[in-house]
Amino acid sequence: MINVSKLKKGIVIDHIEEGRGYYIFKELKLNEIKDPVVLMQNIPSRKMGKKDLIKIETDLDLDLNALGLINPNATINIVKNGELVRKFKLTLPKKVSGLLVCKNPRCITQSEYIPSIDFYLVDEDKKTYRCEYCDTYTTYMEK
Ligand code: CTP
Ligand code: ZN
């Protein structure tokens, strides 16, 4: 098995559903960050059979809220000074900023640059959110 060393500081996104690591990598634009990043795919896991995993050695704060929309069951591990200081499971966010685009073509959010458009969860199973500007429902779709 391929081994990647432990982090001194940064973020480990663990228990990513098999085959979804690359999608998350792209959505978080990890190709653009200047810190060391590894994407591991098809890692044997007792619980999941196989899983993907991403390690980022960084001081940056990533938008983990958005990540909950993409992969609600992943585990986030935060490492500082070589020690795991926080571990938590992602959940589907009740509110998202960015990532979603309102489905209503006449919505203000389509025509102007709005720094933070909030969408509020209305249907957990379908991942449907309500636009704060026009109340239109928009369902999260994978690209
Ligand atoms: N990790 C790391 N650097 C550290 C500490 C942990 O890269 N300094 C990584 C581990 O390699 C592992 C993940 O963070 O991929 C979680 O670490 P740990 O909680 O020790 O592993 P598990 O017990 O297997 O996690 P879980 O119970 O969430 O499955
Ligand atoms: Zn709208």
Image (spheres, helix red, strand yellow):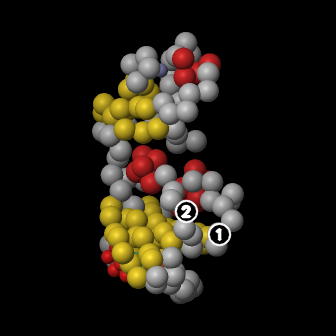
Q: Residue at x 39, y 19 (%)?
A: 135
The amino acid sitting under disc 1 is: Asp
Can residue 82 be spotted in the picture? yes
Which circle's residue, 1 or 2, is located before the other in the chain? Answer: 1
Q: Residue at x 33, y 52 (%)?
A: 91
The percent coordinates of residue 127 (x first, y second) are 37, 37
The percent coordinates of residue 5 (x first, y second) are 54, 86
Count numbered badges in the picture.
2
Q: Is residue 36 left or right of residue 125?
A: right
Which residue in the protein does label 2 denote? 60
Can residue 40 be spotted in the picture? no
Q: Is mark 1 within 8 Å of ligand 1?
A: no
Please tell me which residue lies in front, 63 or 121.
Answer: 63
Which residue in the protein does label 1 denote? 35
The amino acid sitting under disc 2 is: Leu
The percent coordinates of residue 115 (x first, y second) are 55, 33
Q: Is residue 68 above or below residue 51?
A: above
The image quarter in which residue 143 lies: top right
Q: Is residue 51 left or right of residue 112?
A: left
Labels 1 & 2 near each other (Cβ < 8 A): yes
Q: CA distance from mark 1 to mark 2?
A: 9 Å
The percent coordinates of residue 80 (x first, y second) are 45, 77
Q: Residue at x 44, y 63 (%)?
A: 16
Please tell me which residue lies in front, 62 or 44.
Answer: 62
